[in-house]
Image: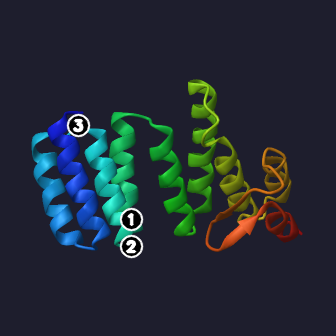
Amino acid sequence: ISTRMQEALKKIDDLAKDEDYSTALVEIQKLLEVHPNEAKIWATRAYVNGRKGDKVAAINDWTNAIKIVEEPHYVYIRGIDFFCLGKYQEAVVDFTRVIELCDFYKSDYYRMPAYFFRADSYQRLQEYDKARSDLGHVDDEFTTWTDRLRNKKDILADCT
């Protein structure tokens, strides 16, 4: 990705942080007209749409980015967006893919969070054995925000 495009994406990121989503999306559209196959632009649009609360649009944008490059971060965040919409089966599919990508890239960066979110998704699908199994890959002290601040014990307690 060129320095010029990095600067343009940084400007868009700043617009989103300032909650000027309309301008940010106009600027992204200009970039997409010239570079429709640049995953980073689709990912930036997904980020902007996610910040403005449009999870459906964000999921579509993440999907476009993933079609170009199957980056674990993109799949992970799309999984979180599915989770936030209560689409737990779709979230399970994405978190499973993230775990596979962790193996492929020999990187554990997203492994534990993916197991955690997948466990929480399984719990909400009432697939308690799968949830408990996934939590075997999660440290006892791991805590993150799903739809509320959650830890391993919270999910285990809900698996009843």
- Of the pair 86 and 114, the residue shown nearer to us: 114
* Left or right: where 61 falls relative to 94: left
Q: Quadrant of residue 83?
A: bottom right
- Of the pair 36 and 51, the residue shown nearer to us: 51
Q: Quadrant of residue 65?
A: top left
Rendered location of residue 75, percent (x, y): 49, 45
Rendered location of residue 52, percent (x, y): 34, 72
In this figure, which residue is indicated by the disc labeled 2?
A: 53
The quadrant of the picture occupied by the C terminus is bottom right
Name the residue: 85% across, 63% down: 156
- Of the pair 61 and 18, the residue shown nearer to us: 18
Q: How far is disc 1 from disc 2 in space, using C-alphas?
A: 5 Å
Name the residue: 38% across, 48% down: 63
Establish if 107 lies above or below 125: above
In this figure, which residue is indicated by the disc labeled 3?
A: 37
CB within 8 Å, label 1 to label 2: yes
Give, as a three-letter code, the residue at label 2: Gly
Which mark is on residue 50?
1
Name the residue: 41% across, 66% down: 55
Helix, strand or loop for disc 1: helix
Q: Earlier in the sequence, mark 3 or mark 1?
A: 3
Q: How far is disc 3 from disc 2 in space, using C-alphas?
A: 25 Å
Density class for disc 2 (Cα within 10 Å; few <14, some 14-19, many ≥20) is few
